[in-house]
Image (tube, rainbow, N blue to C red):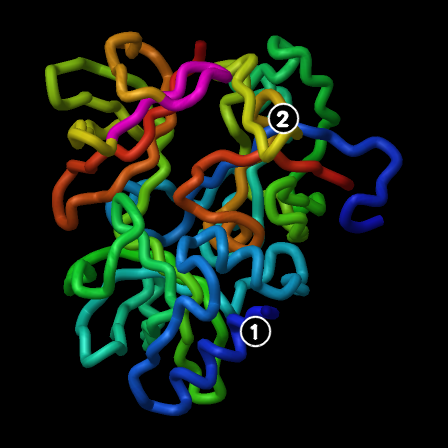
């Protein structure tokens, strides 16, 4: 059975002003499904993307997020049952809190609000070096500042070179250059680690 | 030229980075080597934008012969996983290729090696899922 157009669905869900049921008709709600369904982006290189927003959430009203962009732009972002939500892992709307940072991609509506295909809450991709290693924490130097990376049981994984991701972090070394995908703990210098990439 | 139609594309890993005004640990990122970088714009970092940049990233140590391209140069980046393409302009130096020599990313049976380009969150999210952090890509000029 052909799947309905995800973007048309998101837009109509918002404009209809009612709760959306049966989102599984769209297939997987995982973020990668949103990209498989999204239309080709036609935008001049270097230009601001109108279908993208970032900033921090200042209020939540029903399924509407109010947010302030880092450039002080005010955003209104609609979350529907078809929106993919990531906050350390794929999660649900109730996990989004005021004060969270975010990146969101979706459809810009005529009133200037964004109907979100996907939202990544507090996501970071840190370029860092390992300053110290504890049992459940990595001390990271990032842009000249110290960031504490928390190991989350059942979630944190390490990728060594071209090998598949593993839960074993014992091969990480102090002084090693790493990239860290994780979720920032708002208003702190701490992150929860999803994946740490280390050279072989 | 455009997506997937240049005569000498580069193949490798793409990742993403934040720059410009931002929140959290990204708040100190700044405008990048070109001074124009912004997470909300379709931009990228390239490992060979200048001698100073190249001496940090050293893609040659991973066997990558990446051409010198400077601020504002346009690339067309195609995600192997989604098949989608985005055009981006150079706004920063990076990634630090030689710190991850030999690293490999796959999509199905197609695998590419070495980090050769970083995209801003708006550009990366146009063709891939930010939570993947890393993905194989084709780069055309």
Query: Quick check: B88 left or right of A35?
Result: right
Which class describes the residues within 10 Å of circle 2: few (<14), some (14-19), or many (20+)? some
Tell me the distance, in whole angstroms, between the alpha carbons under discs 1 and 2: 30 Å
- Secondary structure state at the residue bearing disc 1: loop
Pick whichever, A38 or A112, lies toward us: A38
> Which residue lies under the disc numbered 1?
A5
Seen in the picture, residue B116 relative to B17 is either above or below; the reply is above
Residue occupying image coordinates x 61% and y 70%: A2
Which class describes the residues within 10 Å of circle 1: few (<14), some (14-19), or many (20+)? few
Q: In which quarter of the image is residue A111?
A: bottom left
- Residue B113 location (% of width, % of height): 61, 21
Query: Quick check: B107 left or right of A110?
Result: right
Query: Do the residues indicated by labels 1 and 2 lie within the same chain of the protein?
Result: no
Residue occupying image coordinates x 70% and y 37%: B138
Q: Is the C terminus of chain A in the top left, top right, bottom left or bottom right quadrant?
A: top left
Q: What stretch is highlighted in magenta?
A: A156-165
Q: Which mark is residue B111?
A: 2
Seen in the picture, residue A43 relative to A176 is either above or below; the reply is below
Pick whichever, B10 or B75, lies toward us: B10
């Amino acid at each position: 059975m052909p799947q309905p157009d995800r973007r048309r669905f998101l837009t109509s869900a918002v404009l209809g002003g009612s709760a959306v049921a049966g989102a599984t008709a769209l297939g997987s709600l995982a973020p990668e499904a949103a990209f498989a369904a999204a239309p080709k982006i036609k935008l001049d290189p270097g230009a601001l993307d109108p279908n993208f927003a970032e900033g921090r959430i200042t209020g939540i009203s029903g399924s509407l997020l109010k947010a302030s962009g880092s450039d002080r732009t005010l955003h209104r972002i609609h979350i529907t049952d078809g929106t993919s939500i990531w906050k350390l892992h794929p999660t649900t709307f109730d996990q989004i809190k005021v004060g969270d940072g975010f990146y969101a991609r979706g459809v810009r509506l005529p009133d200037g609000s964004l109907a979100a295909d996907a939202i990544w809450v507090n996501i970071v991709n840190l370029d860092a070096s390992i300053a110290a290693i504890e049992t459940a924490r990595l001390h990271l130097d990032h842009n000249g500042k110290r960031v504490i990376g928390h190991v989350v049981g059942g979630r944190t994984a390490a990728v060594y070179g071209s090998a598949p991701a593993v839960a074993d972090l014992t091969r990480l070394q102090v002084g090693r250059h790493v990239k860290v995908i994780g979720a920032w703990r708002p208003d702190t210098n701490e992150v929860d680690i999803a994946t740490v990439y280390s050279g072989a | 030229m455009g997506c997937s139609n240049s005569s000498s594309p580069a193949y490798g890993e793409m990742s993403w980075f934040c720059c410009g005004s931002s929140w959290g640990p990204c708040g100190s990122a700044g405008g990048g080597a070109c001074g124009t970088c912004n997470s909300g714009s379709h931009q990228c970092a390239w490992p060979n934008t200048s001698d100073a940049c190249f001496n940090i990233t050293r893609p040659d140590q991973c066997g990558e012969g990446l051409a010198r391209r400077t601020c504002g140069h346009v690339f067309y980046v195609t995600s192997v996983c989604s098949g989608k393409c985005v055009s981006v302009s150079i706004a920063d130096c990076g990634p630090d290729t030689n710190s991850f020599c030999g690293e490999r990313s796959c999509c199905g049976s197609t695998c590419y090696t070495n980090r050769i380009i970083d995209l801003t969150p708006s550009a990366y999210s146009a063709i891939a899922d930010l939570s993947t952090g890393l993905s194989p890509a084709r780069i055309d000029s």
